[in-house]
Amino acid sequence: MRIVLRTLCFAALLSSCTSETVMRPDVDVGMQTSALIAPAPISQAIEAPISEPVAPEFGTPLTVEEAAPGDQLISRPIPAGFSRLTNPFGLGRADNSGMPAEEVACRKDLKRLGVTWRELPPINDGGVCTINYPIEVSGLPGRAKLKPAATLNCEMALTFSRWVKHELQPAARLRYFSGVDTITQASSYSCRKMVGAGVDKMSEHSKGNAIDIAKIELNNGHDILVRKKGFFAFRERGLLNTVRSDGCQYFSTVLGPGYNKAHKDHFHFDIMERRSGYKACR
């Protein structure tokens, strides 16, 4: 008899406990998760960037300026696996290597011009003799070679490359029907003072801001030495005069044969910054 009573009680207990009451929680995770977060007062709108003010009667997002006292904020959880980025493209910032954005942009411009270069370790020889991100340039636009390879900062390398592409190469083709094969440089980075200027001042070469050009060799084998030409050297004189004068559109300083004894056998190009914006083209 006791066994029968126990069986009947157990059956009655099971009948009152259905699958619906056992399996359904009090709060549905899929539909009610946001409701578990208590609304924040409107004064917290600026401090809580992932929340937005909402008009209670409409449930539409408002700006902080549109929200009125008494309006509430509802939290909008950020999906898992996505970080909140204030500047997703890194504009104006260094890249992964720590290089400033302007240096990165400069190298992209060099690449578009077809320049060949390699990165060098930072240079710091004391005082102004410093280049934080130096490069060694060995190839120029139009497949011209630069020998020996020149150590410059990127801005100077870019300015010089543009001059080669837009002035030197076209001038050579116009007068000699030939492109430029090799440019021989006499000086790039050098920690020294100005030569022949009569002033006790460090040269722009000390900053990687300057380059001296001694010879231009064309694809047809013709060599043009940068020096004062005789009366009958019409084509050579015309080429050198043209690229020298046009260089003033690119560089802040252009010095060459005829200026003084120190520059009798080369062009000096630099991008010295002058407060007045004055350019020295001589």
Image (cartoon, helix red, strand yellow):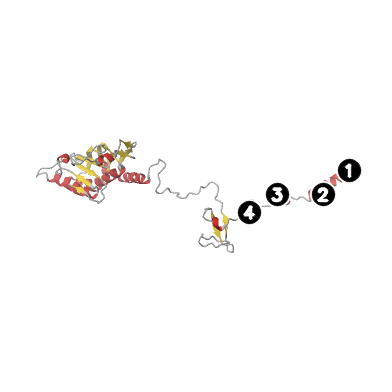
Q: Which residue is mark 4?
A: 32
User: Residue, x 63% and y 54% (percent of image)?
Assistant: 32
Q: Residues within 10 Å of mark 2 (few under 14, many from 20)?
A: few
Q: Residue furthest bottom?
A: 57
Residue under numbered circle 2: 12
| Viewer-side label of 4, 1 | 4
Whether the residues at callouts 1 and 2 have beta carbons within 8 Å, the answer is no
Instruction: Name the N-terminal-most of marks 3 and 4.
Output: 3
| Label 1 – label 2 distance at C-alpha | 16 Å
Q: Is residue 131 left or right of residue 79?
A: left
Q: Secondary structure at mark 3?
A: helix
Give whichever of discs 3 and 1 has the lower sequence position: 1
The residue that disc 1 covers is 2
Distance from label 4 to label 1 (Cα)?
A: 48 Å
Label 4: element kind: helix
Where residue 124 appears, as percent x and y from the top left, is: 32, 36
Task: Calculate the distance from the C-alpha at mark 3 to the C-alpha at mark 2.
Answer: 20 Å
Instruction: Determine which residue is flagged by label 3.
Output: 23
Please provide percent x and percent y for residue 108: 34, 45
